[in-house]
Image (spheres, rainbow, N blue to C red):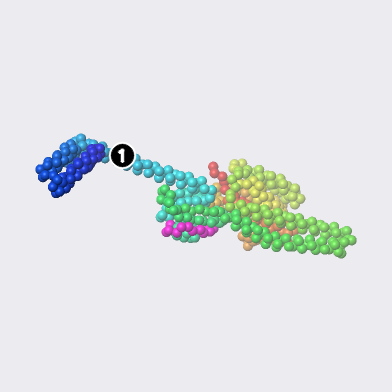
Amino acid sequence: MRGELRRLLELGGAAGALTLPTALLCLVLLQAGKLAPWPAFAICLTGFLTAVLLLRQPLRKLAGLAEDLAGLAAGRPAGGFADALGQDLEQAGRQLRERLDSLATAAEIGALRAEAILRALPEPALSLAADGRIRLANPTIEELFGVGLPGRQLAEAIRSPQVLEAADAVLAGAEAREVEVRLAAPVEREFACRLVRLARPLPGESVALMLLRDLTQLRRSEQMRADFVANASHEIRTPLATLVACVETLSDSARDDPAAQSRFLAIMSEQANRMSRLVEDLLSLSRIELNEHTPPTGRVKLGEVLARVLDGLRLKAEELDVTVALETAADLPPALGDVDELEQVFQNLMDNALKYGRDGKRVEITAALADRILPDVPLARRGAALRIAIRDFGPGIAREHLPRLTERFYRVDNARSRALGGTGLGLAIVKHIVNRHRGVLTIDSSPGQGSTFTVYLPAPPA
């Protein structure tokens, strides 16, 4: 049908090109007296008739099309011209549908590519729609705030006024915003949060991108250096002063006194060992704090760890005349953890039980499944757990001291702790290792009743 219409236009143009110039030429010659009226009329009539002959058939087809269209409007069956027009319209509609399908497919592919890129980013990231809803989220950020983020409002996932204010500014038209945010659960972490408005929005109506950069390790490294200097200078000062005094005495008044030399050398050895233990514990605590935000993923058989630690302390228990009993549940599953760090935890707790509870002459260690971690701990650390309790029957600890026992260098009895070789860092190390394992440390004690240190570790998935 389009061919017929095109042919009609071409013939109409040809007829016009033939008739109009001929008529104008005859009119000019007639006015100039070069042509008589009758010949001029004959020439114009000939051109007109020629144009009519050229256009007769296309005009007839056009009239037929008009009749067919009028028939369609009246409900009569369509004629050939209307059928041709319908075919042309159907073809045009089919081409339009194909084009729309192609555009929809391209948009879908673009959305899949955007999601793939976002999921491949190693840092936590998500995209936002114009109304503040999360459109896409990668697995790294879902580890922080939980799965099922897409479709939720940003305020439901991240409860930080600074982040929400920066997001509102970017969604309102700002090019970018960057803030630092501290998240408390399950372990305190610090992030640099950068929100950027997209110049070309991602498919799926994502208009802004949020990236989180973990600053925890950097901040803890800075704090570790500051704490190490402060703590080391405070705790090392006393043994160092003792060493200096001994050296001065040996080089002066005790130079020729073998008995005094022997006594002072023993003091120097004791103080040097104390400084060595202190430095070793400070370094160990710093390393643990540095990685505290990253939970371990290994599987540890706690029964074997407890037995191995107890074997290493057998000789000390015999020297102190303390009986140690270990009871491990037969159905105890492996724990998610780091075997070396858990050995350090139970080494410190058993060593403390022997040193401070030796008056009771007995230490009991039990390992079993618990229905759940205590309900007053953060939600992320509730659920089924492994329970390891180390109980001594010594003098116990007054209640006012219990909340501060895991602080660095906090001692209930400074003189006794130093006499027993304690550095004041053992329970602080235990607390940070348990935190890294997403567990809980509880302490129950009363004067005259002994003490029980209990470690809850999350049970692995079934």
**Residue that appears at 45% across and 53% down:** 198
Q: Is residue 126 left or right of residue 397?
A: left
Residue 399, x across and y down, in percent: 63, 61
Magenta stretch holds residue 177: yes
Q: Residue furthest bottom?
A: 253
Amino acid of disc 1: Arg
> In the structure shown, which secondary structural element does the residue marked by tag 1 occupy?
helix
Quadrant housing the C terminus? top right
Choose top left, top right, bottom left or bottom right for residue 88: top left
Observer-nearest of 193 and 349: 193
Choose top left, top right, bottom left or bottom right for residue 445: bottom right
Residue 177, x across and y down, in percent: 49, 58
Residue 386, x across and y down, in percent: 59, 47
* Mark 1 closeness class: few <14, some 14–19, many ≥20 residues within 10 Å: few
- Is 210 situated above or below 6? below
**Residue that appears at 42% across and 48% down:** 203
Q: Which residues are magenta?
A: 171-183
Observer-nearest of 115 and 438: 115
Q: Is residue 229 left or right of residue 85?
A: right
Observer-nearest of 421 and 26: 26
Residue 101 appears anywhere in the view? yes
Magenta stretch holds residue 28: no
**Residue that appears at 52% across and 53% down:** 212
Q: Residue furthest front?
A: 34
Name the residue that disc number 1 marks: 94
Q: Residue furthest right?
A: 256
Residue 373, x across and y down, in percent: 56, 51
Q: Residue furthest top?
A: 80
